[in-house]
Amino acid sequence: SATGSTDGRRRDLHAALEGAGAAGIITSNWPGSYGTTRVFNAYNRETPTFELGCEDYGLVHRLAKEGSHPVLRVTAEAENRGEVPVYNVLAAIPGTELPDEYVMLSAHFDSWEGGSGATDNGSGSLLMMETMRILKDVYPNPRRTILVGLWSGEEQGLNGSRAFTEDHPEVVEGLQVLFNQDNGTGRIVNMSAQGLTKAAGSLAGWLAQVPAEVSAGINLQLPGNPGGGGSDYASFVCHGAPGFNLGALSWDYGSHTWHTHRDTFDKLVIDDLKNNAVLAASLIYLASEDPVRVSRERRTVITGRGGGPGQWPTCSPAVRSSGASPRM
């Protein structure tokens, strides 16, 4: 019997088709934008899976339904090179007064192969690299240590950032704040304190000092609710550390570029990315110079329609081998 989620039902269906001896599986993962298809998450280990666009898939379906018995000839080339290592990319500007406390920038640099990963998450990686360039130029001797983490393995379950928090508990313990970006191009318009009640005051205070033309239009959710997944900030939030996501305007990200073959460089809104770099650099500077350590006091998590008590997100271990991945 299929599990309740759409992903679970697909997984069960693909397993049944493979078990029945299918020579190949044709799918269409349509995101709701014509001419666009999502290309990711094959569910089979042995049977090849091919993604068709909505229009072509519909044609094949109609021909099959009317009894025309369409035949598809597919040429595919692939090489299994076995398990290969992947890496995070880290850089630091050492702190001069509080070197064991950290202000951190965060983005993942891996992407799905349907496109070139421009908005997921080349834009976030570009933002953090440009922010570090600005900080190195204008703030070379920070009070606290500035770190940037560009993570691999995010698309397989936040594995790069989860591994980092497991391997570097001293950074999690000494974290003043982390800012993560991972939802497409466009200006930053949403920020949440992730359920940290007193940290909300720190976040609002820093943002109030950013020039209005840079911070205009940002919606603050204070204190908000802790995020249990979705992007790499969650790898820190589950430890109760102040990891905040910089939510962008996104420009049709969800319907057009997220995990699709349309995720290419031409979709980036460069002026907005420049604004975001100034915003991120300003927030990092203010957090680094703040004489007050950011509080980790948590709100009571409310969940469900009845508004009953919930639980703080738990930390999941990093998957460090492809054979151990539940997604493989």
Image: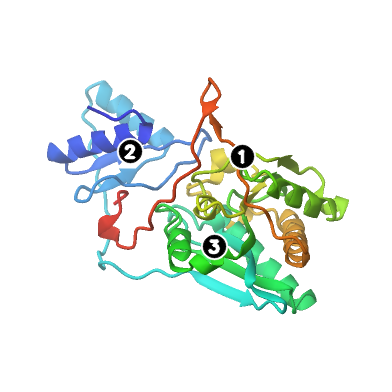
Q: Is residue 166 left or right of residue 299?
A: left
Give the residue at x 29% y 27%: 63
| Residue 128, x across and y down, in percent | 64, 64
Q: Is residue 50 above or below residue 136?
A: above
Nearer mark to the viewer, of 2 and 1:
1
Number of numbered discs: 3
Q: Quadrant of residue 325?
A: bottom left
Q: Is residue 80 above or below residue 304?
A: below
Which element type, helix, strand or loop, lies under badge 2?
Answer: strand
Give the residue at x 48% y 62%: 165
Which amino acid does the dot numbered 2 rest on? Thr
How many angstroms separate mark 2 from mark 1 (CA)? Answer: 43 Å
Which element type, helix, strand or loop, lies under badge 1?
Answer: loop
Which amino acid does the dot numbered 1 rest on? Arg
What residue does disc 3 label?
172
Residue extending furthest right? 212
Report the quarter where the N terminus lies: top left
| Residue 69, x across and y down, in percent | 21, 29
Q: Is residue 50 above or below residue 325?
A: above
Q: Nearer the viewer, residue 128 or 45?
A: 128
What residue does disc 2 label?
27
Are discs 1 and 3 less than 8 Å apart at CB?
no
Give the residue at x 70% y 40%: 222
Which amino acid does the dot numbered 3 rest on? Val
What residue does disc 1 label?
299
Give the residue at x 28% y 67%: 83
Query: Which of marks 1 and 2 precedes in the sequence?
Result: 2
Is residue 77 visible in the rendered image? The answer is: no
Query: Which of marks 3 and 2 precedes in the sequence?
Result: 2
Nearer mark to the viewer, of 1 and 3:
1
